[in-house]
Image: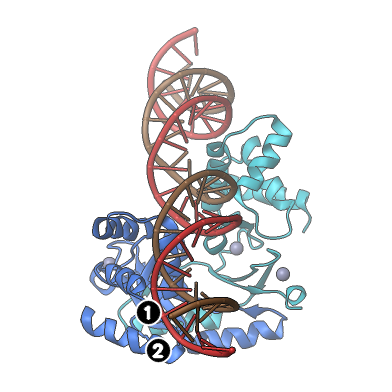
Chain colours: A blue, B cyan, C brown, D red
Amino acid sequence: MDAACFLNAADRHCQQQGAKLTSLRRQVLELVLGYDGVVKAYQVLADLQRQRGIAAPPTVYRALDFLVASGLLHKVDALNGYIVCRHVGCNHEGLILVCSQCGRVQELDATPMLALLREQAGGEGFAIAPQNLLLTGHCQGCQA
Amino acid sequence: MDAACFLNAADRHCQQQGAKLTSLRRQVLELVLGYDGVVKAYQVLADLQRQRGIAAPPTVYRALDFLVASGLLHKVDALNGYIVCRHVGCNHEGLILVCSQCGRVQELDATPMLALLREQAGGEGFAIAPQNLLLTGHCQGCQA
DNA sequence: AAACGTTCTGTTATACCGTAACATTCTTGG
DNA sequence: CCAAGAATGTTACGGTATAACAGAACGTTT
Ligand SMILES: [Zn+2]
Ligand SMILES: [Zn+2]
Ligand SMILES: [Zn+2]
Ligand SMILES: [Zn+2]
């Protein structure tokens, strides 16, 4: 799926949720799409400043928060970064695999497993919040 | 296991690895033990300053890094914090549930889940390395 | 159109998280 | 003792994120 197509899908996705993909949010999403894998807030901020002349941290953080809440992006806590969700619309929770050798990122749908975990944890009185799992390992290309 | 007993076990654990649990590192570990669940670096720093009169961030970060590397603590990325590992020496691969409200920690046996995750990721050509799984949510007391 | 509440964005300032770089002290083996 | 390495002290800085308030845009009601 190329960027333009993804942006259209994102637009529809937001409309279905009653949310608005404003031009600013769309611009931020576009900037994140321009990167291969994990991108950081201040990288996006720098890009935004290049395009708009001026921008402050809250501007980009608010847009990123919105995109995460909408399910268009995922936050990667361990790396203080964000990645584009490649499963928009399927209401999933991500399993994000980071190759510790080459840095590439791969995302699987972890919804079934998290459902099982949630059931098990619920039995112990613990309510697991919606979230992504980040695991490190080696991608196909890096398994000598 | 109480704190004194844990510290002794930690001492033995470090000796077995050829690492040194110096008095500073031991003091930091003791401070982390003094909390119920997740504790942040700057909280430990404040405690250290209360006990020693003066201390700077690198002092506490180096000690924490050492304790994590030794397997005595785990880092909780999503909360920028640290927790005590309760399975020192058993070469575990645990599932740690962290209450994002009160910081308390709970553990589940995640062996079947991790096997499932490995299988799914393996199908995509990704080899997950041994590691701990951290999930956030709300504990029984905080679901009111 | 005018008034209103809501949502979004701009702006300033600041708090929090973590590390680089170098100086000093402590330990350990020869 | 002396040299080499490990650990700690110290200063300074850079990266991450949010609070708080002001202004603009938008849809709704009158
Ligand atoms: Zn996703
Ligand atoms: Zn790789
Ligand atoms: Zn552990
Ligand atoms: Zn709790």
The answer to whether B105 is drawn above or below residue B81 in the figure is below
For badge 1, the amino acid type reads Leu
The answer to whether A89 is drawn above or below residue B77 in the figure is below
Q: Which of the numbered marks, if any, corresponds to residue A21?
A: 1
In which quadrant will I find the C terminus of chain A?
A: bottom left
For badge 2, the amino acid type reads Gln
Q: Position of residue B70 (x, y in %)?
A: 55, 51
Residue at 36% x, 60% y: name it. Answer: A40
Q: Mark 2 or mark 1: which comes first in sequence?
A: 2
Locate ligand 1 by image quadrant.
Answer: bottom left
Q: Is mark 2 within 8 Å of ligand 1?
A: no
The answer to whether B63 is drawn above or below residue C4 in the figure is above
Q: Are marks 2 and 1 in contact (CB under 8 Å)?
A: yes
Characterize the local packing of mark 2: few (<14), some (14-19) or many (20 or more) Cα atoms within 10 angstroms.
few
Q: Secondary structure at mark 2?
A: helix
Q: Chain of mark 1?
A: A
Q: Is residue B110 visible?
A: no
Q: Which residue is mark 2?
A: A15
- The image quadrant of residue A86 is bottom left
